[in-house]
Amino acid sequence: MIICTHARTGATKYALDKAEELDLPCYGELSPAYLQGFGKGPGIKAIIHETKFQPVLSSEEFTSCIEKHDDKVLLVNKSGYLLGPIADVIILRKDLLASLLSFCNLLSRLNSSTPETILFYTTLVFQDCLGMITYCYGTEQQLNLKWFEDLYPKHEQNLESIDSKLLPVYTRFLSELVGGSDAMEKIECLTKLY
């Protein structure tokens, strides 16, 4: 099973829940950042993410996940739009600003992250968001598209790791970033279809 998304959509939890439901192994986020040959230790996601889940994969496991994914649950949230046509599930968020602020909050858990670094990486995440949204908007293929807000209706936004002086700065920057694109118009159209 391939779950395509962008960052901060609850897809890691969804993948873990699906793996348990289907009695399949969950390999987490399929990313070279979680290869055994990349750095030391479990990787940053296993440390700062809410689920504390992200296996480190061998080269063989990584390749196997790409070539044969029927017998496992995989999460693709970097350039997930490239696998959109073969995704079993796509997860998006209606509130894109909340998703981006959630990513800022995640990075803020690392005390070494500067505001410039956080906004730089969040801008890259926005590009993935826009790519995923644009694919879903433009394809004629029927999608199994799920919304974060429908999957987790009782979710309360947690921004406690963001310095209170920086929250308005991040909000203003990201609001301008999102507002300078057509992402919200595409999301509005998609909410009428799915």
Image (tube, grey):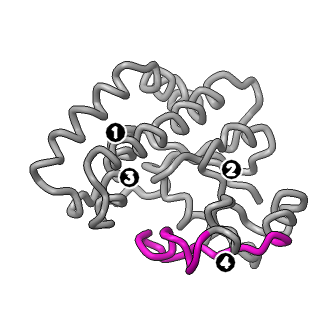
Nearer the N terminus, badge 1 or badge 3?
Answer: 1
Which amino acid is tagged 4? Glu
Q: Residue furthest left?
A: 165
Asked if disc 1 and disc 3 are in contact, CB closer than 8 Å, the reply is: no
Which amino acid is tagged 3? Phe
The residue tagged with tag 2: helix, strand or loop?
A: strand
Residue 21 shows in the view: no
Nearer the N terminus, badge 1 or badge 4?
Answer: 4
Image quadrant containing the C terminus: top right
Disc 3 vs disc 4: which is toward the camera?
3
Instruction: Read off the residue under disc 3.
Output: 103
Q: Position of residue 142 (x, y in %)?
A: 74, 33
Instruction: Read off the residue under disc 1.
Output: 97
Q: Is residue 156 left or right of residue 17?
A: left
What numbered label is drawn on residue 20?
4
Above or below, comparing residue 104 to residue 18 in the picture: above
Disc 1 vs disc 2: which is toward the camera?
1
Q: CA distance from mark 1 to mark 4?
A: 31 Å
Q: Which residues are magenta?
A: 39-61
Q: Is residue 51 left or right of residue 108?
A: right
